[in-house]
Amino acid sequence: MAPNLHATLSLKQRLLLWLMLPVLVAVPVAGLVLYRVMHETAISWLDQSLGDTALAVASLIRERDGQLSVEVSAPTDRALRFDRQDLVYYLVLDPDGNRLYGDAQLRALTVPHRNGGEWYFTLATLNGEALRVAALGSACRFAQSCQVIVAETLHKRDALQRQLIVVVGVIIGGMAVLLAAAGWWATHRGLRPLARLSAELEQRDLARLEPLAAEVPGELRPLIAAFNRLFERLRRAASAQQDFLANAAHQLRTPLTSLRTEIDLALLEPHHPQMEPLLKRLQRSVDRSARLATQMLSIARAEAEPSGRAQPLDLRDIAAQVAEDWVPRALASGVDLGFELEDAPVLGQGFLLRELLENLLHNSLNYAGGGARITVRTACQGDGAMLEVEDNGPGIAPEDRARALQRFQRGSESIGTGSGLGLAIALDIAQRHGGRLELLDAAGGQGLRVRLSMPVRAGA
């Protein structure tokens, strides 16, 4: 089913559409009215000029001894017929319809008889040529009326009509363009408060839940009030979630730590040799449960923590801090853990980046196996900072790497007791920092190299 066109239009496009619809109707109508007014005015002036010629001819009618005549000299005849574009004809008839003077072919025109002072204008065709005809009744013998007929071709009228069409087209076209530009400008200016509001909302996160500014047009104030109420509910929900996470971490870790302590004590106390494997399995299960709870809380905390509280950090310092906790663990597991650290200044959240590195180290220790070699590196490469954890374990097959970055997913050949959350947590933290997490082959070919790439801190 085709989508509704109206639903796909933006607010600006809808406003422009509704503004332009009246313009599309009004402009042609205005153009037609303007053309009609200008055309009728121009035709009236031309008819008046034609009528002036008829009056000039009528003024030349003379009556002597009861005989009517028209006294027209050669210069006067040339003056009456003078026109740069058209041919001018004229004819004078006595009250009986006899020709007194002028062009006899005009008698072929059907012109009604006019009384003294009466006018008649019409269009006619004579010998295949279109003419504009003016007829005037002029008082002559014994209050009777002589007929004065003047006609001219339509060349200047046709030229005038073409010029009017061009002029009106330019005027109306310019008006349409100006109205469209004014509509676009008015719509753009009118929607600027919405654009500013959208930009401000785009930058909002859980770190910025203060009320929006109320300096907006009155129509937007209910929307602003609704957003502010939403922000208040989000602020309360975020605060409640943080409290829940803190309480959950305490409530989960405390009993698991106590249980692990009891198992350790049981292993130290005299016990039946058959209980040793059971206690070891319980010990591993508690460790795995504690690790899983820590990872799940890390995911929740990473998702709930505002992303705007980035601080100037150095990945080298993060790695050095983690080394203090993980070197003893590596030694206890028979793993060679080394560090190649160079300055790598970034902007980020220290506890999240530390959690990322700890998850990568835990994965390497858990899957690389005893006697493995693990190397942590930090450095700058061009305009990026880099953190790598490389091991010489079995690695992850290239076809399984995309799936291994998903939650609760592991490589098809993975060993160990991992939950499949470590790499997913690392990926979430990397994306939160605008970075990229890649699974690569180890430099020596055997093993896995996990690289975090982040932008270098400006000004570092």
Image (spheres, helix red, strand yellow):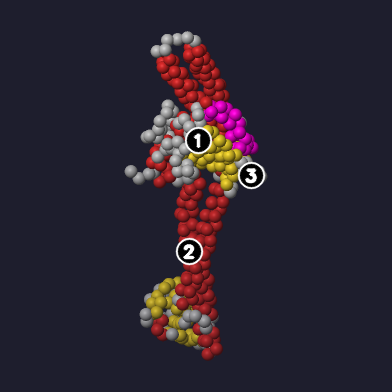
Q: Position of residue 307 (x, y in %)?
A: 57, 34
The magenta-colored residue range is 310-331
Q: Residues within 10 Å of mark 1 (few under 14, many from 20)?
A: many
Q: Is residue 109 magenta?
A: no
> For the residue labelled by badge 1, is the local secondary structure a helix, a strand or a loop?
strand
> For the residue labelled by badge 3, is the local secondary structure a helix, a strand or a loop?
loop
Front one among 433 and 127: 433
Residue at the image point whose x is 62% and y is 35% from the top? 317
Closer to the chain start, of discs 3 and 2, is: 2
Q: CA distance from mark 2 to mark 1?
A: 94 Å
Q: Position of residue 287 (x, y in %)?
A: 47, 21
Does residue 235 appear left or right of residue 400 in this picture? right
The residue tagged 1 is 373
Residue at the image point whose x is 52% and y is 81% from the top? 84
Q: Which-is-in-front pick, marks 2 and 1?
A: 1
Residue 144 visible, this angle: no
Q: CA distance from mark 3 to mark 2?
A: 69 Å
Q: Is residue 440 depicted above or below 22 in this figure?
A: above
Q: Which mark is residue 296?
A: none
The residue tagged 3 is 458
The residue tagged 2 is 36
Q: Position of residue 247 (x, y in %)?
A: 54, 19
